[in-house]
Amino acid sequence: MHPFLAPDYLDAPVALHHRPGWTAHPTVVDASRAWREPMWVALAILVWLAASAWARPLMLPDEGRYVGVAWEMLVSDHWLAPTLDGLPFFHKPPLFYWITAASMSMFGANPWAARAAPLLGAWLGAVALYLFTRRWVGSVAARRVALALAVQPLFLIGGQFANMDMLVAGCTTATILAAADAVLRMEQKQPFRRSLAAAYALAGLGILAKGLIGAAIPGLVMLVWLVATQRWRKVPALLWLPGLGVFLAVAAPWCVAMQQQFAGFFHYFFVVQHFQRFVGSGFNNVQPFWFYPAVLLLFSLPWAPMLYRLAVRRDGDRKPGDPVRSLMGVWLVTVVVFFSLPQSKLLGYVLPAVPPLAYLLADSLSALQPLSQRMHKVWRASNVLAAALGLGAIAWLAVVPTKSTAEIAAALQTHRAPGEPVLMLQHYFYDVPFYARLHDPVTVVDDWQDPEIRTEDSWRKELVDAGGFAPAKAAAVLVDASRLRAVLCRAPVSWVIGPAHALDAYALPHRAQEVLTERGTTLWRVDAACRAAP
């Protein structure tokens, strides 16, 4: 348990008077009771998030890519430098891979174990929000907030999507709340260093989860909140030298080790993969500025009555001086604006805005005390509808797995003998090594001299960039089409995966046996008997 969630956090819940110049009054709670409810809430959130994580295959490209990297880490037993098809892969830092590889080593190579990292990220964010709300607002509000967040379709699906977005969102959420807890403790004349140390440690984990964004977003949210609420004098107290030491101890060693092992790592990881991606326009999924507000609105429609209350709440209903509400409002707006600035917008980027939105939706009921029976029913119906939509989406993806080559990989695993080489034509199928339990890199055949590779955001550029850190390995696994015949002639039997008609384009003097075709992708067996053909 992180320091700001330690026993003293649970033993002394505090509810803030919602008025200017707020003060706090302690609520006396039996110590055993103080522990009991948070433990059950934390367990319930974990079970809810994990219960359906097994249901669907890995989705391409993201889930296949990142789980594939973790699979390579596990089977190679090289846990420091992530690799993609055996090549150093530095698009993202290693925390996701470490968690995923460790999970698969304990629970087996299956989709449920492969989604441990986003599950833990979602759980960390939800539990942190629950505990923070419980301390500074109250138990009833905390339960409402935890429920609204857990059943939010975007949060539920994100918590089961095997990429870095939910992991960093969980770290970001916990970092902001730990730092805010430190500020509020300062104002209450309570010890705050433990919370501050936790914030720095969590920011370090955020760096290892997805890079600089793991510290930049919490820092920006806290700065805007402190300035907007005239707490800017707290900034020097938050810039704590021992805390910076904790941050560096968590985040720096891996980065330094990679730079020592791979020249140019710092430039590629920080400049190319952070700053250039943020300001660049040559990346996938270009969307207008309003994309994220529309996404959040769409996924919050089950709470339409609460959204209406947020939009039309009268000034008399507001709680001036409420530091928690102001934090959540600033947090929501800051994250949405920040990620709306780049042209490239992926759905998962906005996940750090979901926890404050869930808080505001639940908090919209706070002026209605006691709640009427009708509003109780509306609130319950909203959460049930949201849960049903999230589970329905997961069920649909399980029944119609349109972005997966799991069947191809299963056939390959069934028919392939150990040591027989695997080739991929005109595409790298990220999930095949995981599902087929491959222990060695595959040969990828394409036009690797194509000058457009460097200008596109694609699987080809990922492999070429990775190959730049290990040119000798790249020469062995990234093969031009002109060398395909020679590669096939190296082994008695080879296995080839590619688009259904790809093999025909090469006019090879080999007889290829089609084993399986699924959704336009084919698995062939190329037999040694064909090699001697003229």
Image (cartoon, grey):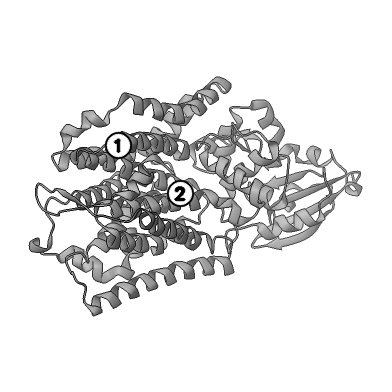
Q: Quadrant of residue 315?
A: bottom left
Give the residue at x 44% y 53%.
Answer: 123
Q: Identify whether 299 is placed above or below 420.
A: below
Task: Return the residue found at the far bottom.
Answer: 374
Residue 93 screen position, x and y as percent:
50, 36
User: Would residue 318 be found to the left or right of residue 190 on screen?
Assistant: left
Residue 329 screen position, x and y as percent:
22, 52
Mark earlier in primary sequence (2, 1)? 2
Mark 2 and mark 1: Cα distance apart in space: 19 Å
Give the residue at x 67% y 49%.
Answer: 434
The answer to whether residue 280 of the structure is visible from this angle is no
Check disc 1 and give the amino acid type: Gly
Residue highlighted by disc 1: 219
Residue 83 screen position, x and y as percent:
61, 36
Disc 2 is placed on an element classified as helix
User: Would residue 478 be found to the left or right of residue 268 on screen?
Assistant: right
Check disc 2 and give the amino acid type: Gly
Q: Residues within 10 Å of mark 2 (few under 14, many from 20)?
A: many
Residue 248 screen position, x and y as percent:
42, 27
Q: Residues within 10 Å of mark 1 (few under 14, many from 20)?
A: some
Q: How many discs appear?
A: 2
Quadrant containing the C terminus is top right
User: Would residue 413 be found to the left or right of residue 282 on screen?
Assistant: right
The label number, if any, that marks residue 121 in the structure image: 2
**Looking at this view, is 107 or 274 the one in front?**
107
**Looking at this view, is 393 or 486 the one in front?**
393
Disc 1 is placed on an element classified as helix
The label number, if any, that marks residue 173 in the structure image: none
Give the residue at x 48% y 63%.
Answer: 48
